[in-house]
């Protein structure tokens, strides 16, 4: 009789932008694809949220969808939602797109060092990103107000950081860092 494989805990990652219709869902799609290529799709869960509820329930921006699809990414159905304290507590790694998003997440953490330690700027994983200066030098460009070419820029910034994120997650899993209790989500 064959025994089922033991359950492997899931490491949870969340990307965060403002409305959850452009940058964070783009990052979610790209990160999920790279994790799958790295053989980690079965142990890492990726989702996205926004710091605002102004776009609640809306799908990914059509320009973001087109740019992702043009680069070969599968774009699943998506509905924007706002991050809350429960989301933050239930994730192992929280990746804000800008310093403003990071500050909002830190406020949501209410001084809990365990939660704030999970918050890392998305582009901090890009080896070519600036390493000195204020945190906002790591902001992922906001394509919302511009042309579709702005979404190409955003995608390039996202793609430049995801391999570093995958390596970080792989290292965390190898070190046996326990993922957050999934019952908290």
Image (cartoon, rainbow, N blue to C red):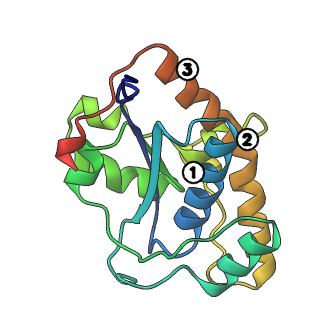
Quadrant of residue 90 in the image? top left
Marker disc for residue 171: 3
Q: Earlier in the sequence, mark 3 or mark 1?
A: 1
* Callout 2 crowding tier (Cα within 10 Å): few <14, some 14–19, many ≥20: some
Q: Earlier in the sequence, mark 2 or mark 3?
A: 2
Q: Are marks 3 and 1 in contact (CB under 8 Å)?
A: no
From the viewer's side, name the closer residue of 147 and 166.
166
Could you say where residue 110 lies in the image, as x and y percent from the top left? 19, 44
Foreground mark, 2 or 1, reads 2
* Callout 3 crowding tier (Cα within 10 Å): few <14, some 14–19, many ≥20: few
Could you say where residue 179 lies in the image, as x and y percent from the top left? 33, 30
From this view, report whether residue 20 is shown above or below residue 119.
Answer: below
Left or right: 97 as drawn, with respect to 10: right
* Callout 1 crowding tier (Cα within 10 Å): few <14, some 14–19, many ≥20: some
Does the rendering let one see residue 69? yes
Q: Quadrant of the N terminus?
A: top left
Which residue position holds label 2?
A: 129
Label 2: element kind: loop
Which residue corresponds to the image point at 18% horizontal and 45% vertical from the top-left?
184
Which residue corresponds to the image point at 40% horizontal and 83% vertical from the top-left?
55
Distance from disc 2 to disc 3, alpha carbons, whole Å, reads: 21 Å
Marker disc for residue 136: 1
Distance from disc 3 to disc 1, alpha carbons, whole Å, reads: 26 Å
Could you say where residue 115 lies in the image, as x and y percent from the top left? 28, 36
Foreground mark, 3 or 1, reads 3
Could you say where residue 84 lies in the image, as x and y percent from the top left? 24, 59
Left or right: 13 as drawn, with respect to 135: left
From this view, report whether residue 119 is shown above or below residue 84.
Answer: above
Does the rendering let one see residue 132? no
Q: Are marks 2 and 3 in contact (CB under 8 Å)?
A: no
From the viewer's side, name the closer residue of 74 and 166.
74
From the viewer's side, name the closer residue of 172 and 135.
172
């Amino acid at each position: 009789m064959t025994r089922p494989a033991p359950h492997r805990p899931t490491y949870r990652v969340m990307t965060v932008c403002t409305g959850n219709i452009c940058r964070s869902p783009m990052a979610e799609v790209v990160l999920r694809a790279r994790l799958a290529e790295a053989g980690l799709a079965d142990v890492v869960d990726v989702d996205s949220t926004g710091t605002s509820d102004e776009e609640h329930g809306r799908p990914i921006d059509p320009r973001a969808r087109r740019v992702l699809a043009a680069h070969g990414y599968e774009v699943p159905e998506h509905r924007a939602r706002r991050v809350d304290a429960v989301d933050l507590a239930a994730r192992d790694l929280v990746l804000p797109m800008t310093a403003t998003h990071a500050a909002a997440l830190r406020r949501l953490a209410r001084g809990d060092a365990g939660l704030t330690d999970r918050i890392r700027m998305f582009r901090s994983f890009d080896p070519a990103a600036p390493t000195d200066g204020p945190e906002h030098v790591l902001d992922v460009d906001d394509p919302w107000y511009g042309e579709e070419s702005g979404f190409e820029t955003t995608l390039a910034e996202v793609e430049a950081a995801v391999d570093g994120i995958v390596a970080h997650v792989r290292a965390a899993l190898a070190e046996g860092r326990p993922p957050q209790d999934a019952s908290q989500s």
